[in-house]
Image (tube, rainbow, N blue to C red):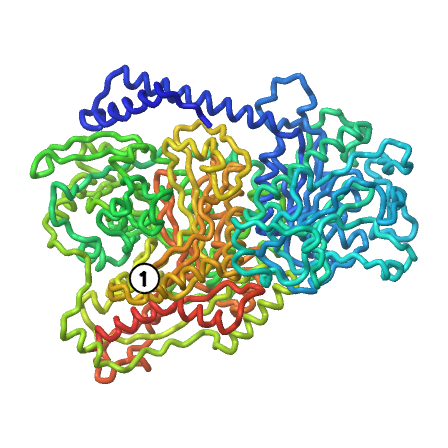
Amino acid sequence: TIDITESDRNSMEKLNNDKERVLINGSSSTTSMYDQDQLKQKNQQQQLQNAQEYKNKKLNLQLLLIDNYDSYTYNLYSYLCTICKYEPIVISNDAYKSWDDLVNSIDFNELQQKDNYDNNSEDTSNIVRGIDGIVISPGPGRPERSQDMGICLEAIEKNPNIPILGVCLGHQALGYYYNATVSLSPSGPVHGLLSSVWYHENQNDNDDDHGNNDSNNNRGHNDRSNGERGVDQLNGDTIPKAPQSSSLSLPPRCNLFDGIPQFFDVVRYHSLVVQFPTEGKRNQRHDNGDSMLDIEPIAWCKGGDPSLKGGKDVFDLHQHHNSDANTESKSEHDPVCMALQHKVYPHYGVQFHPESVGTGEMGYKILENFCNSCLDWINFHSDVPRTSNVNEQSHSDDSVKNLETGRETKSNPDDQKSDSITSPKYKVLLHKVDSDNNENLPSPEKVFEELYASQDNAFWLDSSTGRRNADLDQNTSPTRSSSENHQCPIISNSRFSIMGCNDGPLGKRIEYWGHDHPSDKRGVYVYAEGRGKNKLKIDSDLISFLRDEVSQNGVTTKSTLIDFLDDKGQEILARELEEDDSSIIPFEYRGGYVGYLGYEVRHDTRQSICEHEICNLSENILTKGGDKDTQVSNPNVPTAAFLFTDRSLVYDHWRGDWFVLGIAENSSEVLEKESVDGDNETVLSWIYSITQRLKTMDFDDGLIRKSGSQLKALTDKHSSLNFSLVRSKEQYTKDIERCHKEIKNGESYELCLTNQFQTTVSLPRDQSLSASPFGLYKILRRKNPAPFAAFLKFENKNERDNGASVSICCSSPERFLSISQNKNDSDILSPTKETHGWEFAPPFVSDNMDDTTFIIESKPIKGTTKRKVNMNGDNNGLKEDMEAAEELRTSVKNRAENLMIVDLLRNDLSRVCEPGSVHVPKLMAIESFATVHQMVSTIRGLMKNGETPIDVISACFPGGSMTGAPKLRSIDILNEMELEKSRGPYSGCLGYISLNGCMDMNIVIRTAILTPGNTTTNANTKEGSNSDGCSWDIAIGAGGAITALSESEDEFDEMQLKSRAVKDAIQEWYDDNCT
């Protein structure tokens, strides 16, 4: 960490005071600016020194990481990046048809040094000359199925003299290849659960169980008869067998558990196990009469179901076991092999997941031990040729492998990103309407109703749990909303609401019709509302379109604060602010794109895997389920839709202030000339006009109240709406059974199964907003307030355009992804164990010296239970409510669900974050909302230079909390069970992508999707109501994570619980308008 002296602190204090004077007076002394630059330079120098020391400790290794399409591979990648000087080369298991094809792709003619810091060194040992080790990742499926393993088994066969570490499926692949039995776990699947592991103390002995040296035993899976497994023919060179005489110097062996205590806790995700024959069955194992295997187990855990080992004490990740060997070995079940090794080759496997956040420091130590053994093995075999290009007869010892030529997408995405980023296209102007100087400012609901509710297209990103001075009630200072260290997380995420539409001169409506719609309708449609409502069709997917848009827009780094000095808005004071002036602009939003990505955008983001690793784009794995020319979505609902908004409002719930934001092109002189892009109303005049409306609008406190007659009318009603399930309870129960089967067979760890409730509501035609979807949303935000709530409306009234007609009423409690600016926070650049995350974080120091870095955050929810508290405001049921929250916190099933998704999100963020920076500040915290308690975790990381919000979405979408893990295989299984019907916006994400590079997206849950109905009379039409009315088709998605511990009835009840608040709001909306 950076050492700040007392003098430095005083200087910083002085600088802060100077900064305040700058904001007030618009000028500063040369001395204060000089001091600020000096302190900044000193901090950067210290940061660079720390980064250099951090790099110097890394091992000079180049590893190959084979990805079995798992959702935890990049957790391994991130850990290995902090251990090794060179980032592992990641390839999917089917990127090459054979190992020889992979070897052929190594380009020895192009020397590539991976790190700049040793470019000028004369020490050629820093130049990588080959693959120093191989890590085979976890993954779904079975080791005997070629479609699940790709080249993994061949990698084992062809590389007896290269260290290999197999994890989970990789461990099973080693067991299968070397003739052990791989079968379903006798005690059933174990996913997201902890077990204590003990290991053989003398792993480095070259004796078998009977004390015989077994170095001659080199038989492998593909050549059982003649024992010719000691050679590898590459480029005509013979790699010698391992020493065959105990009198010779034996090669170094890896002690995976060096420095690790016995009975350490590990996280397990597996349905299959590697089984070794017992003493009496050894001679029955092999047809060739061999009584011994080439591999041996070296670590075990107790057999049986870990979930029965003591409830919460076992699964509290902060609680460690104090068992001894005697008690552990007296289990009534046979121990389960947790690690194995080859008796001669440097091949090792671990069944558990060392990269899981739950395994923690011991898992990281295992990877360190493996990497150290790779270096020892290289030094011992210094005369043994490395893997070389079979097309070349000889190569320089200084040759550097370059597998990047095997990438079938862009050759170097980072280079392309950095080259494509341009200077900012837009400027941001804003005015603050201060509540201290303007008493009785209107509530967000009042403002939206008057300004935007009647617009064809509008949005309200509504922190409906926000309230005045909420931060001060928690004894906290009014800091940035993303700071949660000492705050209630619901309060800290409920500070700002954002609203607007696309009626400005630069406004656009963007609709994307993707794979869930017929092919003739697919593409991106852009409606330029401010330019004569021009319509443009672009043959592109949304991710590519937004990536191009963001690149062309550049990143806006400054904003201009506008003050009006007279009553007519003619005289203004404009002050340019840097982006770190959070004391004046306390939020991240700066205008830009607001909208949603529906779940079916998964077809487009699926291919993002090839942006991060070498893979085969032509394989069906990347397009599965997205090539049918059918309508599987509501024809009124685009796959995704956004508004580009150049005029919007932000409300600060904590302070009661309003901010008016306007966007102008940088080429326009809005402060000098009264025209913007040909529009008569300038940005400045619009800001002034809206400011005056806010000041004169009728005051309200934002609360919805019903009169006595309305309340009596509600109590007199007895009919209820009919909500039908797309798949019946009987079918849903069968689907859960199918999930259990897939999990048992190793196809998935967790499957997030969903269903949809549907109803059609017909209301009397009424010109008031109460009968509109916005009327429903007003009820929903009162009944089920949430920090990431939203109302979106897309209405294309031109029938010939056949465009969007959908309203989204969302009360989501879950953040999918946010990107915020890291403002003077050294904790994430040079962290300590205390500041970086939960219990353990790998060593990490960033060498990013940019003035602005970005932090990515995700807050997945897994685990829900009904609240027991009386919602009338008294304390009735408080004890029962606290007991319900504690029962959720200690639930084995829910903790396992949550842990699996935490590890998945760590994996996804590791694709776009600096390696080693991804951490977990909060693990399995309980957050209580109006109707439910939720188990919520927080994952954060430092975004890599050159990445954009679109790259982050591409790497992480759909959210793991809505898919399960491994993500790709789970999505395919779910698609089959959900009858290949689109989930629509549900399970997708909703929020903003700001012009300054920031972003905030929720997960679309607890949501009603409304589209115009086809009829005006149906089973839900109130008797006696006007048949000349309006009809709305409504869909509500709901579901839950299915694990090996799930019970069908409980899962169905949980699905009903999650939909209850939305259904109740719809019922009240219906009753209100049919009285």
| Residue 196 to residue 918: above or below | below
The quarter of the rendered structure image containing the C terminus is bottom left
Q: What residue type is labelled 1?
A: Ala
Point 46% across, 37% down: residue: 834
Question: Measured from the top left, where is residue 53 in percent x and y?
Answer: 55, 24
- The residue carrying mark 1 is 930
- Residue 417: in sight, yes or no? no
| In the image, farthest residue toward the top | 31
Point 27% across, 40% down: residue: 478
Point 44% across, 69% down: residue: 1055
Point 59% across, 45% down: residue: 355
Quadrant location of residue 54?
top right
| In the image, farthest residue toward the bottom | 1023
- Residue 918: in sight, yes or no? yes
Question: Measured from the top left, where is residue 20 in percent x and y?
Answer: 23, 27
- The one of 239 and 219 positioned closer to us in this rendering: 219
- The one of 627 and 789 positioned closer to us in this rendering: 789
- The one of 117 and 310 positioned closer to us in this rendering: 310
Question: Measured from the top left, where is residue 95 in percent x and y?
Answer: 66, 47
SS at mark 1 in the image: loop
